[in-house]
Amino acid sequence: MIETLTALLTAHVFADYVFQSKRTAENKHEFAQLAYHGAVVLALAVLFTGSISAPIFILAALHITTDAIKARTKTTITSHLTDQLAHLVTLTAVAGLAPTLWADGLWSAAPVWVSHFLLLLSGAIYVTRAGGFAIGILMAPYGSEFSKDSLPGGGQMIGLLERGLIYILILSGNPIGIGFLVAAKSVLRFEATRDGDEITNRRRSEYVIIGTLASFGWAILVTLAIHVILLQLPPLGFLPGAP
């Protein structure tokens, strides 16, 4: 089952965060855009599982149904997280009901490391890119005036890098490095919160703290989840201490 779950998770991440355009994401209330996204979800699920079967079609149908519901609700951090949770629950349920999708598919004879690679890759995308969308939605109500003097896209790049570093630090067994990352960012952000009157400084500080804690929290939680799944996969066999 765990290999099937890994393949379906990879398909979901690529469908929503690699091959989904901004136009599609913002216009899923239109049938054409929703159908197109559903076709992408179906194709990627077939590709990564190596299987064409009823559970794959059911998964795609459930995916676009969830998206259709979300498209008719106001985009907030709650609705966004609920949407993602629904997708994750759905693909987990499909993997539980059809655990042999991977074993019976074209990639059944693939080396063990393939599943490890897919999980690490999809995890990296979910931590960095998906996290960027979630943090962006969370911070939207607070306005963007505090980042108007930053480099174009500078805040987004910092977020991607910090979440990526946290992902690497935790999976490499060096979570203590996150403390140094927090300290370094605090020092670099100190000057940015000094310019202006007291009220502006306080608001800017709160804006930075909320964004930073949310970004770090997302990265840590998602990475820990990936780590748990990784431990369930068959061992690679060539690592020190591996059976």
Image (cartoon, rainbow, N blue to C red):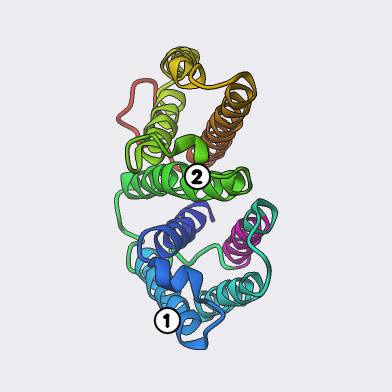
Closer to us: 182 or 60: 182
Q: Within the image, what quadrant is residue 23 found in?
A: bottom left
Q: Residue at x 48, y 19 (%)?
A: 195
Q: Is residue 79 left or right of residue 53?
A: right
Q: Secondary structure at mark 2?
A: helix
Q: Amino acid at mark 2?
A: Gly
| Vertical relation: 37 (above or below) 240 | below
Q: Secondary structure at mark 1?
A: helix
Closer to us: 88 or 236: 88
| Vertical relation: 68 (above or below) 239 | below
Q: Within the image, what quadrant is residue 151 found in?
A: top left
Q: Amino acid at mark 1?
A: Tyr
> Badge 2 local density, few (<14 within 10 Å), some, or many (20+)?
many
**Residue identifier under label 2:** 131
Span colored in magenta: 82-97
Q: Position of residue 63 (x, y in %)?
A: 57, 72
Residue at the extreme front of the image, as rendered:
197
**Residue identifier under label 1:** 36
Closer to us: 129 or 156: 156
Residue 98 colored magenta? Answer: no
Q: Residue at x 65, y 51 (%)?
A: 77
